[in-house]
Image (cartoon, helix red, strand yellow):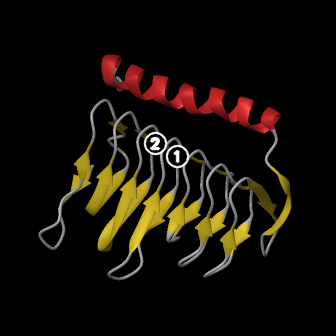
């Protein structure tokens, strides 16, 4: 469901799917070919959220921008189920694992990973091409070509899933 708030309204790009059970509120700008899953909450009520083309915000994710600030999520990013995103920026082609937390003003570089359950602390920066895990998150290795190949498959999967939802829709079963 899309909601305007404080004279700001969400914008949705071409061929992007937003679940009827997702809440997209205020100044949220979703690019083309995105997937916004069931139960996701994107709160652009007192800040701005930008979601780049081809990005998947999976089920149960919460995204919130800081007051008067920006939460920028790059192109072809995968945000795993149940993650909490309150960060400043997430670089293109990055992956956020299920249940991870990116706290206020945190930054995740391009082609980087915050592993499942990782907690990237307020103001913490994870450089490009690194895998960070744990609480607090710490860099443990470089992203490998095997990682990238696997994630490329997953990113295309969600682009295709968004198209399928748009084409055939969901049908309630009573």
Q: Quadrant of residue 20?
A: top left
What residue is rendered at 52% in x and 55% in y?
61
User: Reading the chain from its start, which is encountered first: label 2 or label 1?
Assistant: 2
Where 113 falls versus 169 (above or below)? below
- Outermost residue, left side: 7
- How busy is the neighbourhood of tag 2: few (under 14 within 10 Å), some, or many (20 plus)? many
- Outermost residue, right side: 140
Viewer can see residue 174: no
| Residue nearer the viewer, 84 or 152 | 152
- Outermost residue, front side: 128
Viewer can see residue 75: yes
What residue is rendered at 33% in x and 48% in y?
30
Q: Secondary structure at mark 1?
A: loop
Q: Position of residue 103 (x, y in %)?
A: 59, 75
Where 60 falls versus 7 (above or below)? above
143 lies left or right of 30: right
- Outermost residue, top side: 168
Numbered tag placed on residue 7 in the rendering = none
16 lies left or right of 87: left
Count of numbered marks: 2
Numbered tag placed on residue 59 in the rendering = 1
What residue is rendered at 62% in x and 49% in y?
94
Q: Position of residue 45 (x, y in %)?
A: 29, 72
Q: Circle 2 is placed at which residue position?
A: 37
| Residue nearer the viewer, 37 or 51 | 51
Q: Secondary structure at mark 2?
A: loop
Where 135 falls versus 149 (above or below)? below
Q: Disc 2 vs disc 1: Cβ atoms closer than 8 Å?
A: yes
What residue is rendered at 34% in x and 44% in y?
31
Q: Position of residue 51 (x, y in %)?
A: 40, 52
Q: How far, Cα to Cα, is label 2 from label 1?
A: 5 Å
């Amino acid at each position: 469901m899309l909601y305007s708030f404080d004279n700001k309204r969400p914008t949705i790009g071409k061929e992007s799917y937003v679940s009827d059970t997702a809440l997209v509120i205020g100044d949220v700008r979703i690019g083309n070919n995105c997937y916004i899953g069931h139960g996701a909450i994107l709160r652009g009520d007192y800040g701005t959220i930008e979601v780049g083309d081809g990005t998947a915000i999976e089920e149960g994710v919460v995204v919130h921008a800081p007051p008067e600030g920006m939460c920028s999520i790059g192109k072809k990013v995968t945000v795993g189920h149940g993650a909490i995103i309150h960060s400043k920026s997430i670089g293109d082609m990055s992956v956020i694992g299920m249940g991870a937390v990116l706290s206020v003003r945190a930054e995740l570089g391009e082609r980087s990973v915050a592993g499942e359950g990782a907690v990237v602390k307020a103001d913490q920066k994870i450089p490009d091409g690194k895998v960070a895990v744990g609480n607090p998150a710490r860099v443990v290795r470089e992203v490998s070509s095997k990682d990238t190949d696997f994630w490329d498959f997953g990113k295309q999967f969600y682009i295709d899933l968004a198209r399928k939802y748009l084409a055939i829709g969901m049908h309630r079963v009573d």
